[in-house]
């Protein structure tokens, strides 16, 4: 919906543009760290860790823009949800950047992997394209206000969780058999944990889109419609 005051539309578009640029940087970081994990490229891993500051900078910019719109426009209804939702998404992108930095740091602990550990690394790497697709879909769903697309993203997160659980189990068994490789196995386990957390944050992005479009809070498998939530809160207060 366009506003009578066209500059309001431009303000929202500016926030969205910064958020989209932030998303692209985080996506590139994830793809790059997967490549570094594949080749155990310490130099690339170091560059990825340094670039995390760029992601942090985007969060600061997005926050400042949102605060400016609040101060000047006093947004309400769908505009208010849009700004709150984009603020939530900015936080999730920043935390995704942190997890990617953690993966890059773990690469420094990986040396010549045994064939058994290579198998587990490949299992983790297979989930990266799934997460990248989820990230792409999150931006598309935001741009189009497509909640059906957002809900599919939430369902896809189960795939990431399952890969993490199965890989962890395999690594634990491996460490029991080969204690000498504990350091490398632990590094892979932490990498899997970080990838699982990145998937969780992408799920959060999808939940933010649903909040923006429908006004429904579906975080933590909690709830659906705003009116239902208000009824719930009122009934609880009346107890």
Image (cartoon, helix red, strand yellow):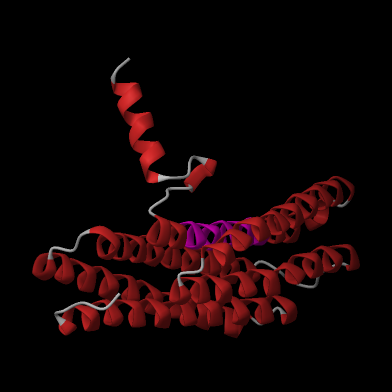
Return the residue nearer the eye: 202 or 107: 202
Which residue does the image show at 43% across and 59% down from the upper left?
A: 208
Residue 190 visible somewhere in the drawing: no
Residue 171 in view in this figure: yes
Q: Position of residue 200 (x, y in %)?
A: 56, 56
- Counting from the top left corner in percent of width and height, residue 46 is at 53, 79
The chief SS type of the magenta part is: helix
Q: Which residue is drawn at the image coordinates 81% and 55% (left, top)? A: 180
Q: Position of residue 164 (x, y in %)?
A: 72, 55
Q: Is 190 drawn above or below residue 119 in the view shown?
A: above
Quadrant for the C terminus in the image: top left
Task: Report the magenta residues as a range.
Answer: 191-207
Which one is nearer the viewer's eye here, 156 or 78?
78
Residue at the (35%, 22%) spot, across then down:
236
Q: Which quadrant is home to the N terminus?
A: bottom left
Instruction: Give percent across and percent down for residue 43.
Output: 59, 84
Asked whether 64 falls inside the magenta stretch, the response is no
Displayed quadrant of residue 157:
bottom right
Residue 140 horizontal side relative to residue 117, left or right? left
């Amino acid at each position: 919906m366009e506003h009578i005051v066209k500059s309001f539309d431009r303000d929202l578009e500016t926030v969205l543009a910064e958020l989209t640029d932030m998303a692209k940087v985080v996506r590139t970081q994830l793809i790059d760290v997967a490549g570094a994990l594949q080749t155990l490229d310490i130099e690339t891993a170091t560059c990825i860790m340094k670039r995390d500051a760029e992601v942090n900078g985007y969060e600061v910019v997005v926050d400042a823009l949102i605060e400016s719109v609040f101060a000047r426009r006093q947004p309400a209804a769908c505009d208010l949800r849009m700004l709150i939702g984009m603020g939530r998404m900015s936080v999730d992108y920043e935390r995704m950047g942190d997890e990617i930095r953690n993966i890059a740091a773990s690469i420094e602990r990986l040396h010549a992997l045994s064939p058994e550990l290579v198998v587990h690394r490949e299992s983790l790497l297979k989930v990266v394209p799934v997460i990248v697709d989820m990230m792409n879909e999150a931006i598309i769903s935001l741009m189009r206000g497509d909640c059906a697309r957002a809900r599919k993203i939430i369902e896809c997160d189960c795939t990431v969780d399952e890969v993490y659980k199965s890989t962890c189990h395999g690594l634990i068994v491996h460490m029991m058999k080969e204690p000498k490789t504990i350091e490398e196995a632990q590094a892979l386990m932490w990498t899997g944990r970080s990838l699982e957390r990145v998937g969780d944050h992408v799920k959060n992005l999808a939940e933010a889109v649903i909040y923006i479009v429908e006004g429904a809070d579906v975080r933590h498998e909690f709830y659906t419609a705003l009116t239902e939530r208000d009824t719930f809160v009122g009934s609880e207060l009346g107890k």
